[in-house]
Image (cartoon, grey):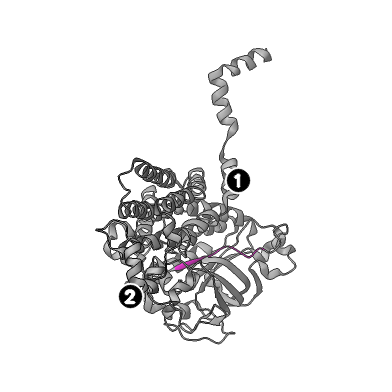
Amino acid sequence: MNAILPPDREESTAERWARFRPIDGAEAYVDSLRGRAVTVYLFGERVAEPVDHPVIRPSINALAATYDLARDEPALATAHSPLIDAPVNRFLHIPTCPEDLVLKNRMQRRLGQLTGTCFQRCAGLDTISVLHSITYDIDEAHGTRYHERYLAFLKEAQRHNVIIGAGMTDPKGDRSRRPHEQDDPDLFLHVTRRTERGLYVTGAKAHMTGGLNSHWICVMPTMNLSEADRDYAVVGLVPGDAPGLTYIYGRQSCDTRALEGGEIDQGNAHYGGQETLVVFDEVFIPWEHVLMDGEYEFAQAMVSRFTAYHRASYVCKTGLGDVMVGAAAAIAEYNGADKASHIRDKLVEMTHLNETIFSSGIASSHEAKPLASGAWINDEMLSNVCKHNVTRFPYEIARFAQDLAGGLMVTLPSEADFKHEEAGPLLAKYLRGRSDIPVETRTRMLRLIENMTLGRNAVGYLTESLHGAGSPQAQRIQILRGMDLPRKKAYAERLAGIDVIATDAGD
């Protein structure tokens, strides 16, 4: 797709877009990632072609599913864009009413059901959503032209049907120090120099979901900034194969099973998530793709609005929860235990927890509010409640699934043993549940539960649920800020007649 560029070339915006062809579906998306000559390290080796690497490919398949859904269920996964007057993938659409956010949530749940993992596009959608209002607000305050640049980029992104990754989280270094106070300034991404055509950034972005699978990366601040942090207050759009980028692929539990051959032991061989550390070494961004440069006072608002969008996006975990409930019900049936009352009660509790997550997330969309730019944003309180539920309930759902699966989930012999001429018949004899359920059927379901609660997709269902979009304390801080205790105390005091007593005492 893209030509290899010399490291010191200041590529123009037009030159950047000329290297991309419009993507018309999942197959074209996969093809668009080939031949990019990106620098990627995994297991201590440089990866020649990430698309064909067995550990990486499942994450690409999960993103490809977002293109399939737009084709198969367009009412859910596409929207009409007024910017280009054409249908676009909903992951590239700016919400202009509560219904847009509601459909986004329903789409996220559906993709979780279809992939059983993180499909890696929510943070990018939430990034372009927040930038609509932030660029508008900065322009209003400073007379800049960021919003015009943003709209020009978004139009091209919609026409080309590309994937945008979110580069928000910096390594942070010493958490007790602000960005400009770090011993190593690169622990937060920052501007190193400016030229007539653009600026250069150095640093890194951590835990980047789907970073390697994205066509573009949007870098942005990760926290509120002071005037001394002005060079860290930068928002810019970078092609995923820009000179100066290095990707270091993150390990996931049981990920080497993809290298062993076979598929049963992987649990979910076709779909997986992806997290990378992305290093920026003097990466150039032309002015046309710079959307913040030094306006540090807007960093906090940007982060706050991003989390209002993104914490509601964690309704995607309810799609994975649907898979977990289904897997738990299936394995109980395969074990011949599905009629027991305590089994059904546990399935009810799993469903209750899953729907509680969904209810708070989708309520935040129904209660959305308009911003000055014309974009709509989720209710902040309900969005934070949604994400706080996600930090807890998937763990309990997973515990129930493991309970119903039984200990065999973690003591199963390997797929190779099942295929062995001597060991295989023994396993077929002794690891059978119900006589009418094939041993392989039962084994596959046990491996799926293992994959989602202990294996590589436990990253997307459990650990990411805890730490993604801010760890639990971050939501509690936002909930504290929005509690409005004086107003609620006033309600109680009025009903208790305390306001009358206070008035009399004053007399």
How many badges with numbers are in the image?
Answer: 2
Q: Amino acid at mark 1?
A: Ile
Q: Are marks 1 and 2 in contact (CB under 8 Å)?
A: no
Q: Amino acid at mark 2?
A: Glu
Q: At x 55% / y 56%, what residue is drawn? A: 467
Look at mark 2 in the image and give the residue it sits on: 27
Camera-side residue: 88 or 134? Answer: 88
Camera-side residue: 272 or 175? Answer: 272
Badge 1 crowding class, 10 Å Cα cut-off, few under 14, some 14 to 19, many 20 or more, is few
Q: Is residue 161 left or right of residue 488?
A: left
Camera-side residue: 172 or 366? Answer: 172
- Position of residue 494 measured from the top left corner of the image (x, y, whole percent): 55, 20
Q: Residue furthest left?
A: 436
Whether residue 362 can be seen here: no
Q: In the figure, residue 74 lies in which quadrant? A: bottom left
- Range covered by the magenta-colored residues: 164-172
Q: At x 35% / y 60%, what residue is drawn? A: 445
Look at mark 1 in the image and give the residue it sits on: 477
| Residue 76 lies within the magenta run | no
Q: Which label was assigned to residue 355?
A: none
Badge 2 crowding class, 10 Å Cα cut-off, few under 14, some 14 to 19, many 20 or more, is few
Q: Does label 1 or label 2 sit earlier along the sequence?
A: 2
Per the image, label 1 sits on a secondary structure element best described as: helix
Per the image, label 2 sits on a secondary structure element best described as: helix
